[in-house]
Image (spheres, helix red, strand yellow):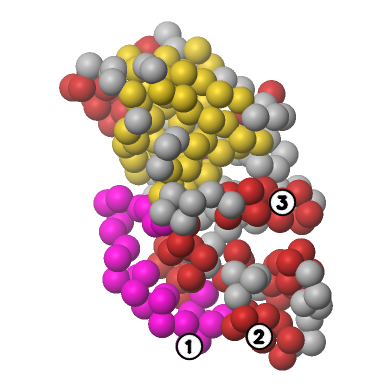
Amino acid sequence: MLIKQFKYSSDNLAYLIYSKNVGIAIDPGAVKDILHFIEKNNIKIKYVTNTHSHYDHVPGNGEILKQTQAEFIDCKKIKSDKTIILGKEKLEIFHTPGHSEDSIVFKGDEFIVTGDTLFNGTIGNCFTGDLKAFFLSLKRLMGFPGNTKIYSGHDYVMESLAIAKTIEKDNLDIDLYMKKYNSKLVVSSLNDELMVNPFIRFNSSSMTDILKAKAMPTGTEFERFQSIMEIY
């Protein structure tokens, strides 16, 4: 299973996941680029969908559907695990509420498309206000193999790492992460995120020490996550 990333607007990221000549377009705001790519590579878009329904992720839906006659998968209707078939390969879809009620994540063999749930270097805002649900969604993603590639919904990398550097000033892994950053292909591994992303580093001793120094609750994973979200 292959994945192609497209940038649109200033920092939004769209995706085409495909197996042989059948694909799914996700947050397809880069309409012209996607249509050019599928024509050049003889790929049929079977499905069109979104990581969530926020306005900046859906503007390409109508035109892509019109041009391809694909089937629309409404992220608002996915409340449990789902599997779709592309060619002979399986693409899993998980409901990951927190950033929004309808947030979903797509998992291939070696990658996940995370939308605004997990970014490269940070996480999304918890617009639902349900921190426990957001925590559980992130924990599920953190349970995947460390070499899993993370493809997110925006390129916020440099801004996010600057914030991470102010939080963990002595974290040398942040500098290494920054050196690997490529604006033409925004991707990291889960292991990378666990080394630098402060919002999922609630099990690291350095982050726990920072929270203790600020007299924040640290007794459980969720308390540490809640403390990080409250401070930062």
Name the residue carrying label 3.
136
First along the sequence among labels 2 and 1: 1
Q: State if disc 2 and disc 3 touch (CB < 8 Å).
A: no
Residue 102 seen anywhere in this rendered image of the structure? yes
Q: How dense is the environment of label 2, judged by Cα within 10 Å: few (below 14), some, or many (20 and up)? A: some
Amino acid type at image mark 2: Ile
Separation of marks 3 and 2 at Cα, in angstroms: 23 Å
Separation of marks 1 and 3 at Cα, in angstroms: 28 Å
Name the residue carrying label 2.
210
Q: Is residue 183 magenta?
A: yes
Name the residue carrying label 1.
170
Report the front residue among 59 and 117: 117
Amino acid type at image mark 1: Asp
Q: Provide the secondary structure element on which disc 3 rests.
A: helix
Residues in magenta, as a range:
163-189
Q: How dense is the environment of label 3, judged by Cα within 10 Å: few (below 14), some, or many (20 and up)? A: some
Mark number displayed over residue 224: none
Separation of marks 2 and 1 at Cα, in angstroms: 12 Å
Q: Residue at x 54, y 62 (%)?
A: 122
Q: Position of residue 13 (x, y in %)?
A: 41, 43
First along the sequence among labels 3 and 2: 3
Q: Provide the secondary structure element on which disc 1 rests.
A: loop
